[in-house]
Image (spheres, grey):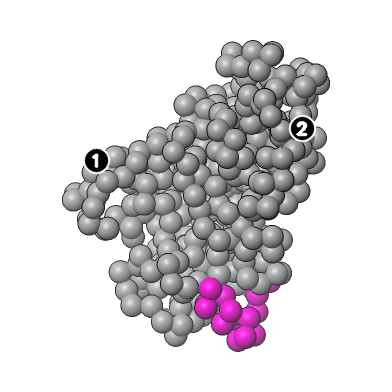
Amino acid sequence: MSEHHIQVVQGPANYYSHPGAIARLADYYSADQLGKAFWVTGERALAAAQPWLEPWLDLPGAKISVFAGHCSVPAVTALAQEAGEDRQVVIGVGGGTILDTAKALAHRLGLPVVTIPTIAATCAAWTPLSVWYNDAGEALHFEVFPQANHLLLLEPQIILQAPARYLQAGIGDTLAKWYEAVVLAPKPAELPLTVRLGLDIAQTLRDVLLEKSEAALADQQAQDLTLAFRDVVDAIVAGGGMVGGLGERYTRIAAAHAVHNGLTVLPQTAQFLHGAKVAYGILVQSALLGQDEVTKQLIAAYKRFDLPTTLAQLDVDIRQRDQVERVILHTLRPGESIHYLPISLTPATLWAALEKVEVLGQ
């Protein structure tokens, strides 16, 4: 990574995060354009957002696709056929899978994309990239698009009503921004200023999340739209996306995401959200790097936020060697982001890290 030529896409062209934000759709698109919108959403997402979307879903000519698959090439191809000709905008309403699919579709059709998140489990609404999966649900690679998302409309009330596990996953995914970026940018003084700004934001996010996540989760349980709750939501959606947008490859993903990808090979982990698996991956990364104090500090925080601190909590039994070996093999694949760590990696060193986390996380 000696060349520092990076593309900086700080975020969407326009971001609104406040009660009533979705109404701003009409400030950017005419009724005529919205009559040629292609909506990509999921069944639960549509139910959650429907009250805010009423005026536009019924426009004659608008098409709505309720989608239940993965962001895969066949799925996006099928949606492109369904969209047909003469569309003006793609609008994604949902979580990461839906939004990644909408972004990939908009890129393919050469249209602007509007993202309306219904959960705050990742920064997918913000980032101009999609993670591609195969139809079996295994993560393949991510693709960064040359165009920023045009409009991101976040209605905090929708996020407040979503199940708590999505917010917990978002907290885990966003904490990883700091722990992974530090590994990718070990000598920030030699890197472009935008990377250093990204690192500064990642550190601020870490502090905000460690300080406010517990309150935000309690406020969500009480259905109370507080500043702490909104801060944590903005940290996940805007902050998390901004870090990668400012520092590109120096602030995106390292070992925590590789461990997540490794876990996806075991079908029983599919029930756990991306951010929960990434959160566990941060523990493995800090164990690999011999950062025992960091590992212990995070485990204490995770117990307050109800994030997994052991493989057992992800339905994986460390004594089932064949299963754990499959995870290790996938995590250490050539080209996987774990290889950015400044240490030599073998299946044995990864085994040792997993075992260490299992003991400390009990």
- Magenta stretch bounds: 315-330
Question: Percent from the top left, x then y, of residue 155?
Answer: 64, 28
Question: Percent from the top left, x then y, of residue 303?
Answer: 58, 59
Q: Which mark is residue 64?
A: 2
Q: Which mark is residue 254?
A: none
At mark 1, the secondary structure is helix
Q: Using the image as rendered, state which of residue 303 and residue 284 is in the foreground.
A: 284
Crowd around label 2: few <14 · some 14–19 · many ≥20 (10 Å) = some
Residue visible at 76% across and 48% down?
Answer: 68
Question: Percent from the top left, x then y, of residue 305?
Answer: 59, 53
Q: Nearer the viewer, mark 1 or mark 2?
A: 2
Crowd around label 1: few <14 · some 14–19 · many ≥20 (10 Å) = few
| 128 part of magenta stretch | no
At mark 2, the secondary structure is strand
Residue visible at 18% across and 50% down?
Answer: 190
Question: Percent from the top left, x then y, of residue 329?
Answer: 52, 78
- Tally the marks: 2
Q: Using the image as rendered, state which of residue 231 and residue 338 is in the foreground.
A: 338
Q: Using the image as rendered, state which of residue 124 and residue 312 is in the foreground.
A: 124
The answer to whether residue 165 is visible is no
Q: Quadrant of the C terminus?
A: bottom right
Residue visible at 71% across and 33% down?
Answer: 84
Could you tell whether 153 is left or right of 353 in the image?
right
Q: Which mark is residue 193?
A: 1
| 318 part of magenta stretch | yes
The answer to whether residue 192 is visible is yes
Q: Earlier in the sequence, mark 1 or mark 2?
A: 2
Q: Amino acid at mark 1?
A: Leu
Q: What separation in Å lies between label 1 and label 2 (alpha carbons)?
A: 42 Å
Residue visible at 61% across and 16% down?
Answer: 29
In the rendered view, would you say 120 is above or below 133?
above
Q: Quadrant of the N terminus?
A: bottom left
